[in-house]
Image (cartoon, rainbow, N blue to C red):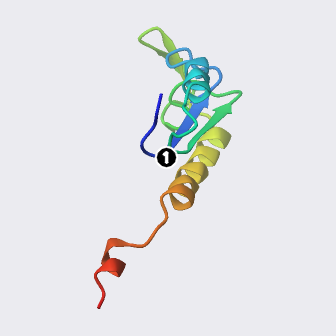
Amino acid sequence: MTLIAPTLILAGEQDDWTPAERCREVVAHARPDSAPIALHVYPDAHHAFDVAVLQPGHRAFGHSVEYNEPAAKDAEEKTRAFPAAHLAGPSPAAGNRR
């Protein structure tokens, strides 16, 4: 698989809806010439770990969903840092200056 844009995957190890193992397979099969790909798996996190209203956790469509504050905060930090690290470059306006 060749990725054309930098990709950040944040997953919960306890996610039974979108299993982290599938994410690991994507990373393992990414071609060397792909855009950067980063995977972080949160050991105690379920699906929708970043949705604060899911306290306490419950079942939805047969799957566990539950907020995990430490994972959510870390994921937010990673989500802000990843584009800055991988998509940084001159702004389009900078190229138009004379």
Question: Residue at position x 50%, y 44% from top?
Answer: 35
Quarter of the view holding residue 32: top right
Q: Position of residue 83 (x, y in %)?
A: 50, 56
In depth, the one of 11 and 8 nearer the eye is: 8
- Horizontal side of residue 27 vs 44, given as left or right: left
Q: Position of residue 75 (x, y in %)?
A: 59, 44
Q: Tag 1's secondary structure?
A: loop
- Horizontal side of residue 90 vs 24, given as left or right: left
Residue lying furthest front: 33
Q: Position of residue 64 (x, y in %)?
A: 54, 16
Q: Is residue 21 above or below residue 31?
A: above
Look at label 1 and name its amino acid. Pro
Q: Is residue 36 above or below residue 86?
A: above
Residue named by callout 1: 6
Q: Is residue 66 above or below residue 53?
A: above
In depth, the one of 10 and 92 nearer the eye is: 92
Q: Position of residue 54 (x, y in %)?
A: 51, 30
Question: Residue at position x 64%, y 20% from top?
Answer: 14
